[in-house]
Image (tube, coloured by chain):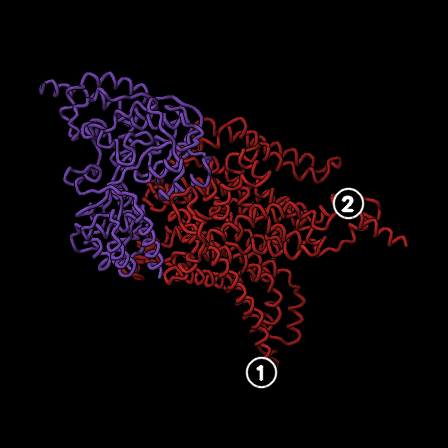
Chain colours: A purple, B red
């Protein structure tokens, strides 16, 4: 078995790499390469699964990867978070492989998305939307998203079961994981002398050394979460005394030190606008490239995963109610769940896409991936991450963010 | 006897007084009064996110208003007003010398050049110009590094981004053009003889400036202040892009209440109080404007005494220092000239940066990677299609130009036809290329920039047509059929002008889900009938409000300067009212409608606030797409897109200027047309 595995591993990657070199991939040969891969991978099925670094333990083999590409037609409109898909996948490649013309618009928060869908009365014209998990129940309830036709998404088998059947949609009738990530912060070690490791360090630095030079994510749960995590409180707390203490601290003491509420600080970090910023892991990873381009030294910058606790968020592909081209929406979702396509997206945005056998995939498809430690987290790290739950307290958190914004402006 | 009969006949042939304004009245009722009424209603409701439209109207209260008066929010109000007032004053201070220089100190040809240089930057995307300010202001940027090397600033670099200062700079920059143009038009209209008379009567230069020039330029200053101050108060783009936490403005805060926080009652209350604050500031401003000269009069005996003394002294020195005075005057001209050049450089720096950074090899528009690359521009020339498009353009326009020169001296072709040949060829080339190819769509297909530019033009064009039709008609009605309704109508128009864009935006966005209950119009909108399909119709509505109000005022102003005797004469000669309107009134207001249309088009093309809230998947315009992109990282190809849009807009403007010049207008008249005065 072991020998066989080795052999296969030696054989398979060569085939993989040749066919999946970026160039070949981009020249529209995906469909062909895909089918070739099915054949190639089938041979190696048993060998790889045992080697899989993922904790699935299911023994699901690479041979089960499905690479079905549903052809479609017309225009496909996606409403999503900023810079969330590789433009090369969205443009010419989508046209050549899926036969759809893509339109992508961006929103800044789940509430923006909900408002846009709700106020257009089911005629927003968007096909695919990408809400964060906890917001899905209210979107179902308000009739903003429709049930998925799972027969059109056979590639859902490629998703690691760990990232399916989440609390907000236990049967995945409405949503499927696009990618997930977490929150931490990013700082310039030439400007900040102390070694930082926890949320408390972040708060102290923002109020001390980096006062007036720090940025926080412009989303109420994250902003308030920072304080809850630092104080060992679950960020889904509904206790009035927790919320009162949080408001008192963030509005009265913390807000005045903030330079910006910025959900995507990577570019601005490179411009030199902040010396420390709360960030989602993928965005912080992109900051390294930008800093290098701006002539800075990326080595000076340190990424810290929030501690002792931090969040785990998952954004999901959903089909909007009244989608003009629901068929193409399914085709896109199905296509983006092809492991190689998924990994190409991952390389671009820097978030874990929830594919099965991730570590094998990376060694085979993207061996030159850098800063993998900002995308993949150990079990011990994942254990510290908490998923958001929408509670009546959310209104209070939004209120705290708003008041902090007003206070920070003074 | 005959006279009175004719008059009676005329009166008989007249329809109800406000008939021409009916389309505008309906439009404003459905798309302004009712939506705003709902905002007022929402402001007394309570937030309830379990509903599709998150407002609970079952128990009305004033809680939202007391929340706004909470100290924290009130601060942002104050900061917004402070930034806007300071920026308006700075625009006057910076713009007045430029307008003065252009109006009095240079030859006609230079006037045209200076004005063009002031106007042209306003036709580059507002948003990309604002984003471009991040380039010179970045603490790690090139400018910052130079300043550090020269020892002017500390090693931290320029610390301006994400502060109110950055917003202040960019807001002055963004609105300066809208101040300079009306100032220029007002100054240019001043009869030079008035100024000469003042000097002949012994007034010094300063006395002439403050005693004659300024009062005569008053209307221009008022127009400039209104054109800049009101949009500034509602501006949310500049603050979002540059302001960070410290430069937050109320427009951004209101917008975030509606989408981010889903707190419509609080957002509504803020918006209503904001209109109140804008009106109050204008009233206070007007009061100061009214009081100041009257207070100054109190000091007049003193002033006259001083003036007489100074005059005597000048008289004594007059002969000996005549040459010196001339030198002084030339020095002043030179200083004004230098100032003008500096202001123009200021206006063009961000645009040059946009062009430069569209060649950036890096992954971000604002961060210069140190290397140039033509890969983004290369995208445009991808394949033979672009070449085909260019060839078709060149051939068709070439034919147009040849035909025009061929027909130049042929008397059998009417002059009005000749003027349009090249323009027509351009339009034909645009349509032909649009029909037989998908060229615009393939421009940066991954970002949809081609589609966005196309949508921008369709939206702006539709809104302009609506604005010109309903604004033109109500302008005529106001000037020619005044009556009891005039006051109400003018009040509505004024209210539309002072309502910050963000308020219209939220009013409409919350109104459209309810529109199906409105007879006829509701059916048209909800069934997506004909051209009212695909989301663009909402943009037409949203963008047409402000634009039509502007057209109304311009047309009214033009007509009220001309009495009705021409139309009456036509009526006396037996022309039915329709014919009199077509052959007499329409030619009279044509230039005003062109002016209004042009101004509308420019405003609509750049519209980001209303469009962002109203746009749908099929109607994303360039500003909307770019605003979306600013939420994460702006890629260098946005620079290419902005330059493209700029070139196309400039082409359209150039054609218009050519047409106007053919019509024999001077530079000043063209400028007057462009500002609608």
Q: Can you give x and y, in whole percent of width and height, for residue B456 in the image?
A: 50, 40
Residue at coordinates 87% horizontally, 54% vertically from top-left? B3
Q: For mark 1, what is the residue?
A: B302
**Distance from Cα at disc 2 to Cα at disc 1:** 59 Å
Q: Nearer the viewer, residue B509 or B476?
A: B509
Which subunit holds the residue at mark 1? B
Pointer 2 local density, CA inside 10 Å: few below 14, some 14–19, many at least 20: some
Residue at coordinates 44% horizontally, 56% vertically from top-left? B61
Figure check: A39 above or below A82: above
SS assignment at label 1: helix
Image quarter (top left, top right, bottom left or bottom right) of the C terminus of chain B = bottom right
SS assignment at label 2: helix
Q: For mark 2, what is the residue?
A: B577
Q: Can you give x and y, in whole percent of width and height, for residue B458 in the image?
A: 54, 38
Q: Residue furthest front?
A: B58
Image quarter (top left, top right, bottom left or bottom right) of the N terminus of chain B = bottom right
Question: In which quarter of the view is residue A44 placed?
Answer: top left
Q: Is residue A408 visible?
A: yes
Asked if residue A239 lies left or right of residue B16, the reply is: left
Q: Earlier in the sequence, mark 2 or mark 1?
A: 1
Residue at coordinates 53% horizontally, 36% vertically from top-left? B526
């Amino acid at each position: 078995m072991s020998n066989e595995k080795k052999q296969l591993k030696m054989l398979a990657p060569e085939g993989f790499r040749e066919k999946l070199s970026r160039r070949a991939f981009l020249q529209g040969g995906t469909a062909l390469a895909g089918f070739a891969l099915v054949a190639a991978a089938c041979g190696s099925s048993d060998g790889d699964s045992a080697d899989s670094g993922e904790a699935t333990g299911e023994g699901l083999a690479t041979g089960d990867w499905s690479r079905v590409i549903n052809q479609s037609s017309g225009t496909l409109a996606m409403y999503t978070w900023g810079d969330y898909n590789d433009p090369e996948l969205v443009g010419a490649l989508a046209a050549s492989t899926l036969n759809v013309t893509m339109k992508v618009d961006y929103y800044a928060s789940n509430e923006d998305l909900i408002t846009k869908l709700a106020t257009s009365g089911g005629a927003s014209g968007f096909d695919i939307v990408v809400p964060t998990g906890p917001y899905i129940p209210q979107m179902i309830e308000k009739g903003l998203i429709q049930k998925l036709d799972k027969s059109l998404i056979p590639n859902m088998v490629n998703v690691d079961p760990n990232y399916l059947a989440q609390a907000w949609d236990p049967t995945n009738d409405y949503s499927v994981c696009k990618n997930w990530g977490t929150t931490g912060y990013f700082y310039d070690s030439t400007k900040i002398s102390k070694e930082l490791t926890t949320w408390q360090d972040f708060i102290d630095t923002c109020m001390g050394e980096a006062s007036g030079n720090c940025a926080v994510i412009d989303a109420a749960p994250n902003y308030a979460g920072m304080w809850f995590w630092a104080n060992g409180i679950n960020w889904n707390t509904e206790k009035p005394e927790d919320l009162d203490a949080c408001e008192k601290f963030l509005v009265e003491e913390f807000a005045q030190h903030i330079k910006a509420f910025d959900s995507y600080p990577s570019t601005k970090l490179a411009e030199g606008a902040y010396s420390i910023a709360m960030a989602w892991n993928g965005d912080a990873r992109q900051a390294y490239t930008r800093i290098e381009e701006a002539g800075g030294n990326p080595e000076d910058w340190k990424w810290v995963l929030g501690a002792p606790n931090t969040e785990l968020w998952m954004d999901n592909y959903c089909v909007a109610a009244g989608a003009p081209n629901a068929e193409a929406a399914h085709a896109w979702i199905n296509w983006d769940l092809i492991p190689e396509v998924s990994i190409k997206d991952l390389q671009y945005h820097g978030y874990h896409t929830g594919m099965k056998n991730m570590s094998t995939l990376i060694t085979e498809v993207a061996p030159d991936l850098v800063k993998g430690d900002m995308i993949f987290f150990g079990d011990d790290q994942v254990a510290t991450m908490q998923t958001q739950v929408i509670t009546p307290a959310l209104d209070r958190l939004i209120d705290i963010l708003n008041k902090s914004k007003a206070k920070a402006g003074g | 006897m005959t006279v009175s009969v004719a008059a009676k006949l005329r009166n008989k042939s007249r329809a109800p007084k406000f008939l021409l304004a009916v389309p505008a009245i309906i439009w404003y009722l459905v798309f302004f009064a009712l939506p705003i009424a709902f905002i007022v209603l929402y402001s007394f409701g309570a937030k309830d996110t379990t509903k599709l439209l998150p407002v609970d109207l079952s128990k009305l209260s004033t809680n939202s208003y007391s929340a706004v008066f909470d100290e924290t929010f009130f601060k942002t109000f104050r900061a917004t007003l402070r930034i806007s007032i300071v920026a308006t004053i700075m625009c006057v201070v910076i713009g007045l010398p430029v307008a003065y220089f252009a109006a009095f100190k240079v030859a006609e040809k230079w006037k045209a050049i200076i004005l063009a240089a002031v106007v042209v930057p306003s036709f580059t995307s507002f948003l990309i110009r604002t984003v471009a300010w991040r380039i010179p202001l970045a603490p790690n940027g090139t400018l910052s590094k130079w300043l550090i090397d020269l020892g002017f600033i500390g090693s931290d670099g320029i610390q301006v981004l994400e502060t109110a200062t950055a917003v202040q700079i960019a807001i002055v920059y963004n609105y300066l053009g809208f101040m300079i143009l009306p100032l220029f038009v007002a100054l240019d209209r001043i009869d030079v003889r008035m100024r000469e008379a003042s000097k002949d009567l012994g007034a010094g230069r300063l006395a002439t400036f403050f005693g004659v020039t300024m009062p005569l330029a008053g209307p221009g200053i008022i127009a400039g202040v209104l054109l800049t101050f009101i949009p500034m108060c509602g501006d949310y783009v500049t603050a979002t892009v540059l302001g960070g936490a410290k430069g937050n403005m109320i427009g951004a805060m209101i917008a975030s209440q509606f989408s981010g926080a889903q707190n419509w009652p609080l957002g509504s209350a803020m918006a209503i109080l904001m209109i109140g604050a804008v009106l109050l500031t204008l009233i206070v401003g007007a009061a100061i404007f009214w009081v100041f000269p009257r207070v100054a009069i109190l000091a007049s005996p003193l002033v006259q005494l001083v003036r007489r003394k100074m005059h005597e002294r000048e008289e004594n020195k007059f002969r000996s220092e005549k040459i010196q005075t001339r030198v002084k005057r030339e020095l002043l001209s030179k200083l004004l000239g230098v100032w003008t050049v500096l202001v123009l450089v200021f206006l063009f720096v961000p645009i040059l940066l946009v062009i430069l950074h569209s060649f950036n090899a890096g992954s971000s528009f604002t961060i210069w990677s140190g290397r140039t690359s033509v890969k983004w521009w290369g995208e445009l020339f991808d394949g033979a299609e672009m070449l085909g498009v260019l060839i078709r353009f060149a051939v068709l326009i070439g034919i147009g130009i040849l035909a025009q020169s061929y027909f130049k001296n042929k008397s059998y072709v009417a002059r009005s036809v000749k003027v349009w040949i090249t323009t027509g060829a351009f339009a034909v080339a645009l349509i032909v290329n649009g029909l037989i190819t998908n060229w615009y769509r393939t421009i940066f297909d991954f970002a949809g920039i081609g589609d966005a530019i196309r949508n921008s033009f369709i939206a702006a064009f539709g809104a302009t047509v609506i604005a010109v039709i309903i604004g033109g008609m109500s302008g005529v009605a106001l000037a020619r059929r005044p009556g009891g309704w005039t006051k109400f109508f003018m009040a509505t128009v004024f209210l539309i002008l002072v309502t910050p864009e963000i308020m219209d935006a939220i009013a409409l966005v919350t109104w459209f889900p309810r529109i199906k209950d409105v007879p006829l119009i509701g059916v048209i909108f909800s069934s997506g009938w004909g051209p009212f399909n695909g989301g663009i119709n909402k943009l037409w509505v949203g963008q047409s409000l402000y634009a039509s109000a502007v057209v109304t005022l311009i047309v009214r102003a033009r007509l009220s300067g001309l009495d009705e005797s021409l139309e009456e004469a036509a009526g006396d000669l037996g022309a039915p009212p329709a014919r009199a309107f077509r052959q007499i009134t329409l030619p009279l207001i044509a230039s005003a409608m062109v002016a209004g249309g042009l101004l509308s088009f420019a405003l609509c093309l750049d519209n980001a606030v209303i469009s962002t809230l109203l746009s749908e998947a099929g109607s994303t315009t360039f500003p909307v797409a770019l605003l979306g992109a600013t939420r994460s990282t702006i890629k260098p190809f946005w620079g290419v897109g902005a330059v493209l849009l700029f070139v196309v807009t400039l082409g359209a403007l150039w054609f218009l200027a050519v047409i106007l010049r053919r019509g024999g207008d001077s530079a000043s008249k063209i400028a007057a047309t462009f500002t609608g005065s």
